Image (cartoon, grey):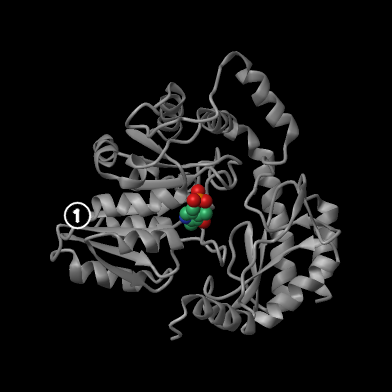
Amino acid sequence: MSKDIFAYLQNELDSLAKSNNLRKLPEVHHDNNRIIRNGNNMLNISSNDYLGLASDVLLRNRFLEECRDRDYLFTASSSRLLTGNYTVYDELEQHLVTLYGSESALVFNCGYHANTGILPAIADAATLVLADKLVHASIIDGLKLTDSKNIRFRHNNYEQLERLLAHNAHLYDRIIIVVESVYSMDGDLCDLLRIVALKKQYDNVLLYVDEAHGVGVFGQTGLGLAQECGCIKDVDFIVGTFGKALASTGAYVICRSVVREYLINKMRPLIFTTALPPVNIAWTKFIMENLYSFEDKRKHLRSLYENLIKAVKLKTGECNSQSQIIPFVAGESEKAVEMSVKLQKKGFYVLPVRPPTVPQGTSRLRFSLTASITKDEMDRLTEAINQL
Ligand SMILES: *Cc1c(COP(=O)(O)O)cnc(C)c1O
């Protein structure tokens, strides 16, 4: 390693570039659900705006109309534990409790905070955490901060999970299983009912489900996969984020009251940060109040999924996606980049995903659907995929 730190950093960047893995902040302009980059106007198929709410002007105007009589501030000026706990926070949390029929709910600044804060607060040295191999980076970072022993089981491998539970349940005070409902790089789902059944065989096993890509999209009223599976009550920690399908910012956990109170006392990313601005919380609350009414969008998203997965399977032979996130695995990074450039030339903004985000040799195009895509646009996209 070079002694000159800056030369060393440049070297590292050069080798990332050499392997086609150098990241840059893209210079992009937005026009509703379209992206304009280097003069090329493209349909955005890379955002997490799954229901198309972020670009819904009517919805935004309805909100602005509603909050005319309420003077929502643009900053909370403080942590919620000091003076930042505006009434709208309680209103949102109360609404979440009503929606989920849970004991309580707690709102955070983002999913990254939720996942780097909850587990470190509750998982002590007498805890074993069993996390799926493919959980999000924020959970992995959270696990680095825990005092617990942590084991990652093979992705969606419930035989292994069952063995790990059987071997370890009596050795620890408690075990926490950590999974995602929808996996962000493959778009596949966890088998929530099977995990719940496993958990129920023990009285010291808890379940933590990150629904970042599930809320808004799955469930009878859009509350996520746990709602769709009818097992909200069996999940001890449902973590959802507001920044994706829900078109806002922030995150929440659905949990027992005692957990909420404990987190307020122990969770560092809740305590040591300025709360989100009340105006953002009000917008989130508005979205949550209207969530049930987006059923037609969820249905349309589902039909877009059916079309796209058919086209991808025709080219790749297989694809395990069961959600709005659909990967087209290309193999080498170079190939994924090349395909992405081709689709962009045809007006589709699809991005390559490369290591370290995904394992070596599985670089891919990652389609991320939004309900604002029309049937016509989808037909043109599947045609373009066909010609790749
Ligand atoms: C996006 C994401 C997060 C982080 O949420 P933010 O609110 O964007 O910080 C956490 N978990 C998963 C699975 C995600 O996809």
Most distant residue in the top direction? 69
Q: Quadrant of residue 386?
A: bottom right
- Whether 154 is drawn above or below 288: the answer is below
Q: Residue at x 56, y 18 (%)?
A: 71
Residue, disc 1: 204
Task: Choose between 86 and 387: the one closer to the eye.
Answer: 86
For the N terminus, the image quarter is bottom left
Q: Quadrant of residue 153?
A: bottom left
Confirm whether residue 191 shows in the render: no
Amino acid tagged 1: Asn
Quadrant in the rendering for residue 263: top left
Can residue 195 be seen by looking at this rendering?
yes
Q: Measuring from the top left, give residue 357's x and y in whole percent.
A: 53, 70
Secondary structure under tag 1 reads: loop
| Quadrant the C terminus occupies | bottom right
In this picture, residue 310 sits left or right of residue 138: right
Q: Nearer the viewer, residue 254 or 9?
A: 9
| Residue 170: percent from left, percent from top | 13, 64
- The spot of residue 67 in percent (x, y) is 61, 20
Image point 86% across, 59% down: which residue?
39
> In this picture, is 7 found above or below 25?
below
- The residue shown at (74%, 71%) is 340
Foreground pick, 115 / 313: 115
- Left or right? Give the position of 17 relative to 161: right
* Residue 387 screen position, x and y as percent: 84, 75
| Residue located at (58% from left, 61% from top) | 322
**Ligand 1 within 8 Å, label 1 CB:** no
Label 1 neighbour load within 10 Å: few <14, some 14-19, many 20+: some
